[in-house]
């Protein structure tokens, strides 16, 4: 058979020729009779009986793997986000001997792909047809993955509420909970069970403020207190009770950053600012405008498709509730009409409650499962 293959290759070097071993005791006639004509095509396309992987292995931001019939394929480096090409640095690890081959290739250029397959066939002994099939499938998967990244970047799901849906059982339980006439008292009890010690009035009010981001009328809270009195712990504990995909927890906001969010990236969010004192005057102004007007607009300079510089209006829509913390004893007068101002409980009784709760934790008497359930 090898001799026949060599003779054919000498006669027609331009045609790829492969030897295929049929299963023991079988020939094309018996396969046709026993398994039908489809089996012949499947066998010719996959003579080894092994299937390639139909999923990508995302190893990191700069390495993507794929298991083909001829070996492992890796894209090294970042994918180009220009949808008009797919130029990548490709590493191929042969299946049988683990030998590595490296090349740069544009997977969208079919002639380039064919030439590379032919060259690897002649110099390295690859099966050109199987290698080409692997690269075509790899290209399809990479293109699909890249388009998902592109769509996620250009159209983030921020103008919707949480994508996670309740199960029918959880939905029924939630409706039953909300129908209770003492629903607010029960919420406060669960907040205490979730790890918020004392602060009975503050915790319930802050929960209502935080959850208003899902309502037409938004609320904002400004929590005041001395350093180390638990302001951040309080607002973080409330945020932990919200869907985490809707929470934006910020330690610092630069003066111009709010103007550069995507149009609907601040829609239906709970915004936490750990230290409002750290915001400069421009950042505070932008934040207040978003609270009041529910949008920010700015005139900026861009280049059009012809390379000409022109002005453009950029608008950031905002529909969010917020909880912010400050150590300043004086009220931010510009925020009084926009925010509910709360003071943390710094009394001796509150301190004793916290110490008692900490002692229970240290002694192992605290029910962590009950806290997480709440």
Image (cartoon, helix red, strand yellow):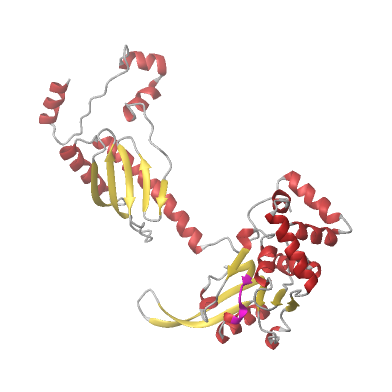
Quadrant into which the C terminus falls:
bottom right
Q: Is residue 73 left or right of residue 174?
A: left
Residue 247 in the image: x percent, y percent?
62, 64
Does 195 appear above or below 45?
below
Does 70 appear above or below 157?
above
Q: Is residue 6 left or right of residue 224?
A: left
Residue drawn at x 77%, y 60% is: 192
* Whether residue 195 can be seen here: no
155 and 347: which one is in front? 347
Residue drawn at x 81%, y 52% is: 175
Say whether residue 276 is magenta. yes
Q: Quadrant of residue 98?
A: top left
Q: Is residue 11 left or right of residue 55?
A: left
Quadrant into which the N terminus falls:
top left
Does 78 appear above or below 320?
above
Q: Quadrant of residue 271?
A: bottom right
Q: Which residues are magenta?
A: 272-277
- Residue sitting at the far top: 25
Residue 288 in the image: x percent, y percent?
64, 81
255 and 351: which one is in front? 351
Q: Quadrant of residue 248?
A: bottom right
37 and 98: which one is in front? 98
Residue 228 in the image: x percent, y percent?
65, 73
21 and 15: which one is in front? 21
């Amino acid at each position: 058979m090898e001799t026949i293959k060599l003779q054919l290759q000498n006669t027609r070097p331009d045609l790829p020729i492969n030897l295929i071993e049929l299963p023991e005791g079988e020939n094309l006639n018996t396969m046709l009779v026993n398994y039908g004509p489809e089996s012949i095509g499947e066998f010719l396309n996959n003579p080894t009986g092994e299937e390639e992987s139909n999923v990508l292995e995302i190893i990191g931001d700069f390495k993507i793997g794929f298991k083909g019939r001829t070996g492992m394929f890796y894209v090294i480096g970042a994918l180009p986000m220009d949808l008009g090409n797919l130029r990548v640095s490709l590493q191929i690890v042969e299946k049988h001997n683990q030998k590595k081959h490296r090349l740069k290739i544009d997977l969208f250029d079919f002639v380039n792909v064919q030439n590379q397959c032919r060259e690897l066939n002649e110099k390295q002994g690859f099966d050109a047809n199987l290698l080409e099939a692997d690269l075509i499938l790899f290209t399809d998967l990479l293109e699909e993955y890249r388009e998902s990244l592109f769509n996620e970047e250009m159209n983030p799901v921020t103008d919707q509420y949480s994508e996670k849906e309740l199960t029918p059982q959880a939905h029924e339980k939630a409706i039953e909970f909300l129908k209770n006439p003492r629903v607010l008292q029960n919420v406060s009890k669960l907040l205490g069970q979730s790890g918020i010690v004392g602060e009975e009035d503050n915790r319930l009010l802050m929960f209502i403020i935080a959850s208003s981001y899902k309502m037409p009328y938004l609320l904002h809270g400004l929590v005041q207190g001395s350093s180390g009195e638990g302001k951040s712990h309080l607002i973080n504990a409330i945020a932990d009770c919200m869907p985490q995909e809707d929470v934006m927890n910020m330690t610092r906001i630069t003066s111009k950053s709010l103007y550069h969010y995507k149009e609907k990236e601040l829609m239906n969010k709970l915004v936490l600012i750990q230290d409002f004192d750290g915001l400069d005057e421009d950042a505070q102004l932008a934040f207040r405008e978003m609270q009041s007007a529910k949008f920010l607009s700015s005139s900026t300079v861009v280049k059009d498709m012809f390379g000409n510089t022109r002005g453009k209006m950029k608008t950031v829509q905002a529909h969010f509730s917020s909880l912010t913390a400050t150590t300043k004893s004086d009220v931010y007068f510009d925020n009084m009409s926009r925010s509910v101002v709360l003071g943390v409980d710094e009394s001796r009784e509150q301190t004793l409650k916290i110490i008692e709760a900490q002692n229970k934790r240290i002694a192992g008497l605290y029910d962590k499962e009950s806290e997480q359930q709440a």
